[in-house]
Image (cartoon, rainbow, N blue to C red):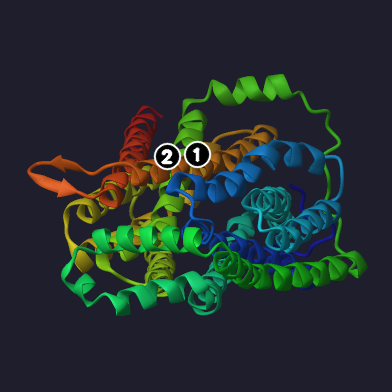
């Protein structure tokens, strides 16, 4: 990262020097764009399960494709961006984003679940480019002394996109699905469902959907066609928005804050990174954190519908509440960092997340759901904290490739929801004298993630304090 030449002493103390205000605003818009994509996609795991009448494990392939795209492209994007300008990297990312979103058009017309998966995979190629470009570009827009403040300011716009995606899913996608209307009609037709466990009701409604599809295939096909058109609409709109932003970037003059001309020695860099226990532990912890986050936010809809008896839209509203708590907690935890080391705070938050997840497993009804929502308060500062701990002490060159490794760790959001979906498809189990439904049982997976994160956080806290004392 290079500072702008000729900057005055006053501008060097600014979070955003005057000459960078316009490009900062433009690049910051990207943070909201990828936040939207992340959180409009999560509810589709449950929606596609009912639309296509597939298993939870199959529908969780949405997350496999989405976060698998990040993992596939993170390191190639980081290496390519070293050879081209930041502007070129952003243009590539926006183009891939638009192409992936637009693939929902043929996917919905063909009524092919796998084509949706390909579209999400390509879309997140674009997001990987945007994240690996926008973050260092924002850092470079001014003096190093205010780089962290600058990035935190830009990242504050990411949850705005996330909340927008959640609201669009809650207000326009989920309530507009014919499968949602079918579910409500079944509940109205069977008053005895009010006296049954929500998990049993959910199974009966799924069975009724399957029977209806077999009895009247044409009606079922019309329902699928309608629902996929509902799903397609926001992705087509966002594709148009992304293309407009792409055009804006093409015609805009963005400052060249410097590119690396130094030859890349990948093997040397990799050796430096993989012999650093704090970095390796950070990548592992980040993998488990992203897995825990995506599982918690994806399957809260399953939890609400299966265990509490909510509609899909009502359950999604609890996801919106979780995001609000997540945002508020981020400011609180940032303040606490002034008085507590990052490693110790990470460990404490992970313990809190684990205890709340245990509450979601063992407590019944809305109490368990509120515990699950509360987990978001503990997750709020984990990603940037792990990110900072992992890169702490690395040379600038090592940190550049190291950043790509931490973005690659987003792969945790690909394979862990798939495993949780398989658990939900299985049978329940009696633990400590309590019968746990498959959905409840599946949350032992994010619970184990928090155990790993807590171990890393406390290890960093202990070894950092020892190093400080020895120093």
Q: Secondary structure at mark 2?
A: helix
Is any part of residue 399 visible from this angle?
Answer: yes
Q: Which mark is residue 309?
A: none
Is any part of residue 380 visible from this angle?
Answer: no
Neighbour tally class for label 2: few under 14, some 14-19, many 20 plus, Cα within 10 Å: some
Neighbour tally class for label 1: few under 14, some 14-19, many 20 plus, Cα within 10 Å: some
Residue 398 rendering spot, x and y as whole percentages? 65, 32
* Residue 243 placement, left or right of 59: right
Residue at x 86% of width, y 40% of height? 83
Residue 446 rendering spot, x and y as whole percentages? 35, 45
Foreground pick, 211 / 242: 211
Q: Residue furthest left?
A: 433
Residue 50 rendering spot, x and y as whole percentages? 47, 60
**What residue did someone put label 2 on?**
419
Q: Residue furthest front?
A: 215
Residue at x 36% of width, y 27% of height? 470
Q: Secondary structure at mark 1?
A: helix
Whether label 2 touches label 1, CB < 8 Å: yes
**Vertically, is 83 above or below 183?**
above
**Vertically, is 100 above or below 403?**
below
**Vertically, is 417 above or below 381?**
above
Q: CA distance from mark 2 to mark 1?
A: 7 Å
Foreground pick, 206 / 340: 206
Foreground pick, 348 / 414: 414
* Residue 401 placement, left or right of 359: right
> Which image quadrant is residue 220 in?
bottom right
Image quadrant where one finds the C terminus: top left
**What residue did someone put label 1 on?**
415
């Amino acid at each position: 990262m290079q500072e702008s030449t000729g900057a005055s002493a006053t501008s060097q103390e600014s979070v955003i020097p005057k000459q960078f205000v316009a490009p900062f605003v433009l690049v910051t818009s990207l943070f909201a764009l990828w936040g939207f994509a992340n959180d409009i996609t999560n509810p589709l795991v449950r929606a596609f399960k009912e639309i296509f009448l597939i298993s939870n494990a199959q529908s969780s392939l949405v997350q496999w494709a989405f976060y698998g795209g990040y993992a596939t492209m993170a390191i190639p994007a980081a290496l390519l961006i070293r050879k081209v300008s930041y502007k070129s990297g952003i243009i590539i990312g926006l183009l891939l984003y638009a192409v992936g979103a637009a693939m929902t058009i043929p996917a919905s017309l063909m009524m092919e679940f796998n084509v949706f998966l390909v579209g999400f995979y390509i879309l997140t190629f674009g997001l990987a480019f945007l994240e690996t470009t926008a973050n260092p570009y924002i850092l470079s827009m001014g003096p190093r002394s205010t780089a962290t403040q600058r990035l935190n300011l830009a990242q504050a716009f990411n949850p705005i996109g996330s909340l927008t995606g959640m609201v669009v899913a809650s207000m326009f996608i989920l309530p507009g699905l014919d499968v949602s209307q079918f579910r409500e009609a079944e509940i109205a037709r069977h008053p005895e469902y009010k006296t049954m466990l929500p998990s049993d009701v959910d199974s009966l409604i799924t069975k009724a959907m399957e029977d209806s599809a077999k009895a009247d295939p044409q009606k079922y096909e019309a329902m699928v066609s309608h629902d996929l058109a509902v799903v397609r609409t926001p992705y087509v709109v966002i594709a148009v928005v992304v293309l407009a932003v792409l055009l804006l970037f093409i015609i805009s003059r963005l400052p060249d804050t410097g590119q690396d001309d130094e030859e890349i020695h990948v093997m040397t860099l990799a050796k430096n990174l993989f012999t650093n226990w704090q970095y390796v532990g950070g990548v592992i912890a980040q993998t488990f954190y992203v897995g825990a986050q995506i599982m918690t936010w994806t399957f809260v809809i399953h939890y609400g519908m299966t265990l509490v008896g909510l509609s899909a839209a009502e359950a999604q509203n609890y996801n919106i509440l979780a995001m609000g708590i997540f945002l508020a907690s981020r400011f609180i935890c940032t303040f606490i960092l002034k008085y507590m080391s990052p490693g110790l705070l990470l460990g404490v938050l992970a313990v809190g997340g684990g205890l709340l997840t245990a509450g979601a497993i063992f407590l019944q009804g809305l109490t368990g759901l509120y515990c699950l929502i509360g987990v978001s308060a503990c997750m709020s500062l984990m990603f940037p904290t792990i990110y900072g701990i992992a890169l702490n002490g690395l040379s600038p060159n090592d940190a550049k490739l190291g950043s790509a490794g931490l973005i690659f760790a987003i792969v945790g959001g690909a394979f862990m929801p798939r495993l949780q979906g398989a658990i939900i498809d299985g049978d329940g189990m009696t633990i400590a004298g309590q019968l746990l439904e498959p959905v409840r049982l599946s949350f032992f997976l994010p619970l184990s993630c928090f155990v790993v994160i807590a171990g890393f956080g406390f290890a960093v806290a202990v070894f950092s304090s020892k190093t400080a004392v020895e120093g």
